[in-house]
Amino acid sequence: MYLFHADPGHGWLQVKRQELIDIGILDKITHYSYQKGDNVYLEEDCDLSRFIAKMNELGKQVEIKESNSNYDSPIRFYDSFKG
C-alpha cells in the first residue's frame, strides 16, 4: 500500500528509493519530486504516472491510500529529488 499525500495545491506518492532502483526508474524521476530519508515523494503530474506505468508493465498492483490536508504539506519543504 502506498500513501498519497495531498494539500490544496499538489500531491505526492510516497515510495521507497530502493523500489525505484529495483524497477529501474530512479534515473527518470524529476527534480519536481522530493526526498527525505529513504523515501521519495513522487509529484503527481509526471513522476507518479511514470511509476504507475512501470508497475503496470511489471504486472504489479499499486494500491493507494490518500492523506489530504487543508494546509501546505511539509513535503514542500523536503529536499528536491536528486537521483
Image (cartoon, rainbow, N blue to C red):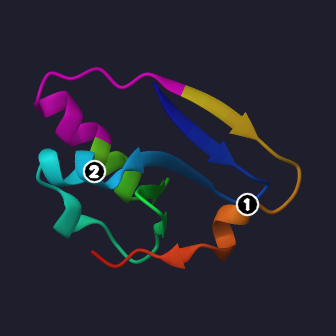
* In the depicted structure, whether residue 60 falls above or below residue 6: above
Please name the residue shown 76% across and 40% down the image. 68
Residue farthest along the front direction in this orientation: 37
Residue type at tag 1: Gly
Circle 1 SS class: loop
Label 2 environment density (alpha carbons within 10 Å; few <14, some 14–19, many ≥20): some
- Give coordinates of residue 37: x percent, y percent: 47, 63
Residue that carries the numbered disc 2 in the rendered image? 50
Camera-side residue of 21 and 67 = 21
* Magenta residue check for 30: no
Q: Position of residue 22 (x, y in %)?
A: 14, 46
Per the image, label 2 sits on a secondary structure element best described as helix
Residue drawn at 12 percent across, 32 percent down: 57
Give the percent coordinates (x, y) of residue 50: 28, 50
Q: Give how far apart the Cα atoms at labels 2 and 1 are.
A: 20 Å
Q: Which residue is mark 1?
A: 9
Choose top left, top right, bottom left or bottom right for residue 38. bottom left
Q: Earlier in the sequence, mark 2 or mark 1?
A: 1
Up-down relation of residue 57 to residue 83 (above or below): above
Give the vertical position of 15 relative to 72 (above or below): above
Say what amino acid the circle numbered 2 marks.
Arg
Question: What crowding class fits label 1: few (fewer than 14 Cα within 10 Å), some (14-19), or many (20 or more)?
Answer: few
Q: Residues in magenta?
A: 52-64
Quadrant of the rendering where the N terminus is positioned: top left
